Structure formats: structure tokens, C-alpha cells
Amino acid sequence: MRLAFGWRAPRRGIIGMIASGRIESVGRDVKSFKEGDEVFGMDGFRAGTYAEKVCWPATTQLALKPANLSFEEAAALPYGGLLASFFVRRLKVGAGRRVLIYGASGAIGTSAVQLAKHLGAEVTGVCSTGNVDLVRSLGAAAVVDYTKEDFTQRGDRYDVIFDAVGKRKSAQAMANSAAALTSGGVAMSVDDSFPRTNTSDLMALKQLAESGELRPVIDRVYPLDDIVEAHRYVDLGHKKGNVVVTVAPSVG
Ligand SMILES: NC(=O)c1ccc[n+]([C@@H]2O[C@H](COP(=O)([O-])OP(=O)(O)OC[C@H]3O[C@@H](n4cnc5c(N)ncnc54)[C@H](OP(=O)(O)O)[C@@H]3O)[C@@H](O)[C@H]2O)c1
């Protein structure tokens, strides 16, 4: 990540990769969007969304905002939703598969639970005590509280184990994950691959949000003036879903 975004500090003075807002103007060759369109999206390469305005090329993963979501809710979808879409596809999550999501209450985890459920999988979520109800409400058939129980010791077997926490914290718990796999089952961490995200997945997220099958989970909303506090909170590593930053008071 440092190679991509800057070794000692961010290459770009203004960071931020995700946004939802209203298009102010488009270049003359842009046909897919027009002034006034309400959009949401992510540009993993350019950054710059911690600002009132961002200038994105037409190649950015951008789509019309789900009609039923506020700008804050829409901004909470692309990061976790696109990464979860990549891994769910990679892991061949589908109907009838038994899937365990480790870290089911984070940004990627809350999306992964809902996408796996949408695809017909039988989902087990792993999270801490305070997030058990949240994860169940997202569609998990079973929830394991990792502060009380080790999922690898329950005797249950899964076709897919997806670590959405990240290896820095999950290494110990995931070390025994092979014991909880079915024969032919597969375990993967969110840190095992550099996810390739795409606009068609973003359109799919929009449709799922509009049909009520995908709910953006927002923990806290901060104004841009409180961005330091927002980052400190995220760095604690226990947010529920997403933290959203509002930039202009008129947006929302
Ligand atoms: N491959 C890539 O390009 C890429 C890109 C972005 C992110 N990532 C990885 O994805 C990870 C998750 O990102 P995120 O934004 O979804 O994180 P997040 O929203 O902060 O969620 C992490 C979740 O992990 C759980 N957790 C924290 N400490 C834990 C522990 N010791 N044991 C078990 N669970 C624990 C938390 O749930 P509780 O509060 O219930 O504990 C939290 O909900 C990152 O840490 C990073 O490693 C990879």
C-alpha cells in the first residue's frame, strides 16, 4: 500500500478514495453522466475526496446513487461493497455453500455477509459481543462471538472461510482455520489479494441497495472539520461497518 500511495506519507496532499455527491460539471466527451446527477463511487488510484469537490476521469468507478439512499448512506457502500464483491466472487460463494465471515461487523465484513446471503449461502459471522445482533440482522444464520468461543473448536465445517479482519489481527485465530474447512474448502484473507474492483459490481450494489437486499452500515458520521477524530476512531479497529465524513452542509 505504501508503494502505491506514498512511502513516508501520502503522495497526494488530499486523501480519500470514496465519495457520493452531485455532479457539478462534466467534460465535453462524457456521455454517461450529466450536471446535477447524484452519484457514488470509488477511485482507488487518484484520491482527493476529502474536499468540497473532486475531479474524476470518466474511467472512475462511478454510478448513479441508489435512489433510496442518502449521500451518507451511498458513500458507505463502495469500499466494503466492492472489496466484498471481489472476494465473494473469488471464493465462489453461492447457493448452498457454508460460508464463515471472520470480522463480520467491519466495512468489508458487513457487505460480505449480505452479499453471501443474497447469493444463497448459509452464512456464519464472527464478531465481538456488542456486534452479534447487528451481524444477525444482516442475514447471518449463525453468529460466533470470538471473545467467548473459537470458531475452529465448534466442530462445524465450512466450504469457505473469509477473513475480513486482516492478517495483522487475524493471524492467530486463522492459524487453525483448516480444521474448520470441509474437504475441498478454501480459506482466504482480505490481505491475500489485491482486489480488482469494477463498475459493474458498483451497479450491482446499487440495485441490491434499491431492492433492500444490501444495507449500508454506518457507525458514525463526522464533519470534515473533525477528520482527525474520525481517523482516530477508525484506527481503534472496531468500527461497526463504516465511518462517513460529510464535507458540505448542503450535501445530505
Ligand atoms: N487487500 C487490500 O487491498 C485491502 C484493502 C483494504 C483493506 N484490507 C484489509 O481489510 C481489513 C478490514 O478492513 P475494514 O475497513 O473492513 O476494517 P474494519 O471496518 O475496521 O473492520 C474490522 C473488523 O475486525 C474486527 N476485529 C478487530 N479486531 C479483531 C480481533 N482481534 N479479532 C477479531 N476481529 C477483530 C472488528 O470487529 P469487532 O469490533 O466485533 O471486534 C471490526 O469490525 C483491513 O484491516 C486490511 O487488513 C485489504
Image (cartoon, helix red, strand yellow):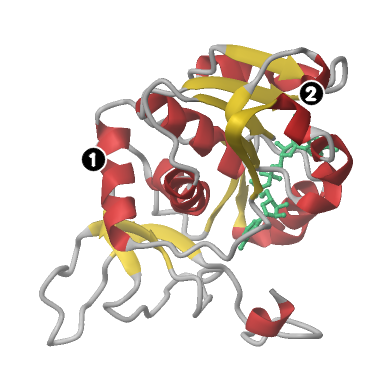
The residue at the point 26 percent across, 33 percent down is 210
Q: From mark 1 to mark 2, how far is it between C-alphas?
A: 41 Å
Residue 172: image location, x then y, percent: 89, 40
Dot 1 beta carbon under 8 Å from ligand 1: no
Residue 88: image location, x then y, percent: 47, 43
Label whose residue precedes the other's in the sequence (1 or 2): 1
Answer yes or no: is residue 104 visible: no
Dot 2 beta carbon under 8 Å from ligand 1: no
Pointers 1 and 2 in contact (CB under 8 A)? Answer: no
In which quadrant of this rendering is ligand 1 seen? top right
Q: Nearer the viewer, mark 1 or mark 2?
A: 2
Quick one: label 2, few (<14), some, or many (20+) residues within 10 Å? some
Quarter occupied by residue 155? top right
Question: Which quadrant, please, contains the N terminus?
Answer: bottom right
Q: Which residue is mark 1?
A: 67
Residue 20: image location, x then y, percent: 39, 56
96 or 243, nearer to the observer: 96
Q: Which residue is mark 2?
A: 152
The residue at the point 34 percent across, 66 percent down is 61
